[in-house]
Amino acid sequence: MYRALLSILPLVLCAACYEDRIACLDPDATNYDLRADEACPDDCCTYPAFRVEIARLWGEAAFSTTDTFTDGALNRFRLLRFRYYLGGLELVAGNSPLAVPENPVEVRVLSGTDTLPAVLNANLVLAQSTGSNVSTVGTLRIGKAALTQVRGKFGLSSDFLPVFPPSAPSNSPLATQAGLLNFNDGRGYLQASAEYLLTATNDTLRVDAYGLLPFVLDFPAAVAPQRGTDLTVLLAADLSNVFGTINLAADSTAVVNALQERLPALLRVTGVR
């Protein structure tokens, strides 16, 4: 009897000292803990990154700013720099968009002659013809449904119109850029900006476009997501579909109109990783 009591005693003591395991119970989080007994507060879960990687092409070949190309009017030119904003980016599963990617950025916004602090969700990308071709859109809750599309807009919404660019973090697409992309002229950030050299006249020109242009890019095939892991959507930007089809020697208004007309043909999805 005495020995039986001794064998039971450790079990009683263990039961008395057991503590619940409190951790993240969201399967979409990178720190999801299947062994947890109780969900932690919302701010303990961390979520994977949603990125886009844009391959810069001219037809089937890699694009280079040192190459000379032919536009739609047979003008020879070099594309020195091409930049464009992709705003409001989100993924679609089936016919339903996923939760908006989160990328809160602290900035100051213009208010009369002063600036005020604000936090904006910068789920956007500044795509460029040179430099890094990988950009982080934000954090993502990906769910279980197969992914079918990525969608957004060329350009930034009116939410970003009053942003004071010097107040944005230096690594943010909203920060002041070399060859300005926001002139605080009441129109907000540019949609796209192209700088090019016409070789026949040796003239260097720049055209700037404003506005919003929605796009929807279908995946080559539906992609089953891996919950809790980073996701990169691979895009190809075929610059020949835009600059190879317009007359770059026309007046700036005509070039901007043609550029905006052709922008929807620029991008396609090539894969996901």
Image (cartoon, helix red, strand yellow):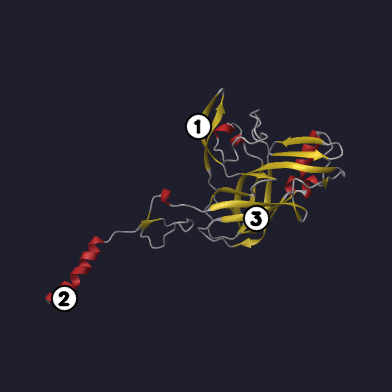
List x then y, in percent, for residue 86. Answer: 65, 44
Tell whether label 3 touches label 2 (CB within 8 Å). no
Whether residue 258 can be seen here = yes
Q: CA distance from mark 1 to mark 2?
A: 69 Å
Q: CA distance from mark 1 to mark 3?
A: 34 Å
List x then y, in percent, for residue 190. Answer: 67, 36
Looking at the image, which residue is at 51% across and 34% down?
Answer: 118
Check residue 234 in the rendering and tell me which mark sits there, or answer none. Answer: 3
Location of mark 2 (residue): 4
List x then y, in percent, for residue 72. Answer: 85, 45
Location of mark 1 (residue): 117
Q: Quadrant of residue 204?
A: top right
- Whether 141 is drawn above or below 193: the answer is below
247 vs 190, left or right, is right
Towards the viewer: 266 or 212: 266
Q: Quadrant of residue 11?
A: bottom left
Towards the viewer: 110 or 97: 110
Report the amino acid beneath label 2. Answer: Ala
Whether residue 163 can be seen here = no
Say which element carries label 2: helix
Q: CA distance from mark 2 to mark 3?
A: 66 Å
- For disc 3, the neighbor class at 10 Å (few under 14, some 14 to 19, many from 20) is some
117 vs 201, left or right, is left
Tell whether label 3 touches label 1 (CB within 8 Å). no
Report the amino acid beneath label 1. Answer: Pro
- For disc 1, the neighbor class at 10 Å (few under 14, some 14 to 19, many from 20) is few
Quarter of the picture containing the N terminus is: bottom left
Quarter of the picture containing the C terminus is: bottom right
